Image (spheres, rainbow, N blue to C red):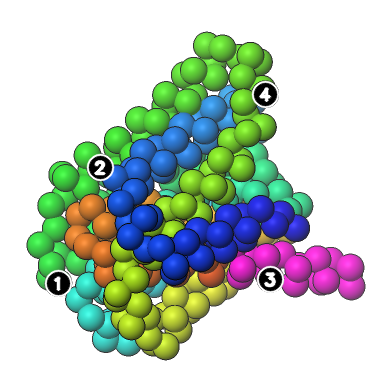
């Protein structure tokens, strides 16, 4: 198991706890850090991997549809059922509307799932998220709070799509000259997301009383039901085992870094709390899920 990400998170959470004023001054770095993560993801894209998936588009289409529908609709149903405050309501809608995160690719690798499909699903949902993330937020949250749709589109484009394309183009131009740098990017991504979590926690250091038991329950249900529903759909469609694993992980894990950035810069620090807590939890739950699969695989 990769222990560097938990180490980075623990390190920055300790700083956020003991020196919140220091980390809170770095909040302007959040979109830059997330953009660099997307840039690194763009540099890992290779056409040969995508072609393998396009040759069997059914898996890609089903996975993309599930990614872009299950989590936002689950978020809407859960926050209404548990009657969360308007700010937390909006925070969950933003989180649920985000695409899959880069961490899902790592967990698909650990689960012996279909890595090319995982990468292609992450890319596809990320590209579509430029419009669909703001659109879901606008549709599901407009009755709760005023939402500037085009402002969200612009933010999502500059934070996600633009650096993703830049990374892809630069990799295409320079080709194998960047191989040494590519080895560095996974750790940099872990470091960046952990730093973002620390910054958000430091900003919310005086508002941590908002983290109630109900909030934790909704986060757990959102993630676990996302895993469960996507796995059930894939099972009903008789998808191969590795494809079921891939789509399940991709659906249940969100780009919580994007959720944090959009929440903080468009609505406020309390709105970012669901994305912050989710970013901690979904790594734990994914590891638990992978271990369950490994135990089942040994028994069969």
Does residue 244 appear to the left or right of 293 in the view shown? left
Q: Residues within 10 Å of mark 3 (few under 14, many from 20)?
A: few
Of callouts 4 and 2, which one flags the residue occurring earlier in the amino acid sequence? 2
**SS assignment for the magenta stretch, majority:** helix
First in sequence, mark 3 or 2: give its number.
2
**Highlighted range, magenta:** 283-299
How packed mark 4 is, by other alpha carbons closer than 10 Å (few <14, some 14-19, many 20 or more), is few
Q: Which residue is mark 2?
A: 155
Q: Tag 3 or tag 1, which sits nearer the N-term?
A: 1
Cα gap from disc 1 to disc 2, whole angstroms: 21 Å
* Residue 222, quarter of the rendered image: bottom left
Query: Along the horizontal axis of the image, is 66 left or right of 95?
Result: right
Q: What is the spatial separation of the Cα atoms under label 1 and label 3, in whole angstroms?
A: 35 Å
Q: For the C terminus, give its image quadrant.
A: bottom right
Residue 281 visible in the snapshot:
yes
* Residue 295 drawn in magenta: yes
Give the SS element for disc 3: helix
Q: Residues within 10 Å of mark 1 (few under 14, many from 20)?
A: few
Q: Position of residue 247 (x, y in %)?
A: 59, 56
On residue 144, which mark appears? 1
Cα distance, mark 4 to mark 1?
Answer: 48 Å
Quarter of the image for residue 264 reads: bottom left
Identify residue for label 3.
Answer: 288
Badge 1 vs badge 3, beta-carbon distance below 8 Å: no
Above or below, comparing residue 15 to residue 104 in the picture = below
Per the image, the residue denoted by label 4 is 180
């Amino acid at each position: 198991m990769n222990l560097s990400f938990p180490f980075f998170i623990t390190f920055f959470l300790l700083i956020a706890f003991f020196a919140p004023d220091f980390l809170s001054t770095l909040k302007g770095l959040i979109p830059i850090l997330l953009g660099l993560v997307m840039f690194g993801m763009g540099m890992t894209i290779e056409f040969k991997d995508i072609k393998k998936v396009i040759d069997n588009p059914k898996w890609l289409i089903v996975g993309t549809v599930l990614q872009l529908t299950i989590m936002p609709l689950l978020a809407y149903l859960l926050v209404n059922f548990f009657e969360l405050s308007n700010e937390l309501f909006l925070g969950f809608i933003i989180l649920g509307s985000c695409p899959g995160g880069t961490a899902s690719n790592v967990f698909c690798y650990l689960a012996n799932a279909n890595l090319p499909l995982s990468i292609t699903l992450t890319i596809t949902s990320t590209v579509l998220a430029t419009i669909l993330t703001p659109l879901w937020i606008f549709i599901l949250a407009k009755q709760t709070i005023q939402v500037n749709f085009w402002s969200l589109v612009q933010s999502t484009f500059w934070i996600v799509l633009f650096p993703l394309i830049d990374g892809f183009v630069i990799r295409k131009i320079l080709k194998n000259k960047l191989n040494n740098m590519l080895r560095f990017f996974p750790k940099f991504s872990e470091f960046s997301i952990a730093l973002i979590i620390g910054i958000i926690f430091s900003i919310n250091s005086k508002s941590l009383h908002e983290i109630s038991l109900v909030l934790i329950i909704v986060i757990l249900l959102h993630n676990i039901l996302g895993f469960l529903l996507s796995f059930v759909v894939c099972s009903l469609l008789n998808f191969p085992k590795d494809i079921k694993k891939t789509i399940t992980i991709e659906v249940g894990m969100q780009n919580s870094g994007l959720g944090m950035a959009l929440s903080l810069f468009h609505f406020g620090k309390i709105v970012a709390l669901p994305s912050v807590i989710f970013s901690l939890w979904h790594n734990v739950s994914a590891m638990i899920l992978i271990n369950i699969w490994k135990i089942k695989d040994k028994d069969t």
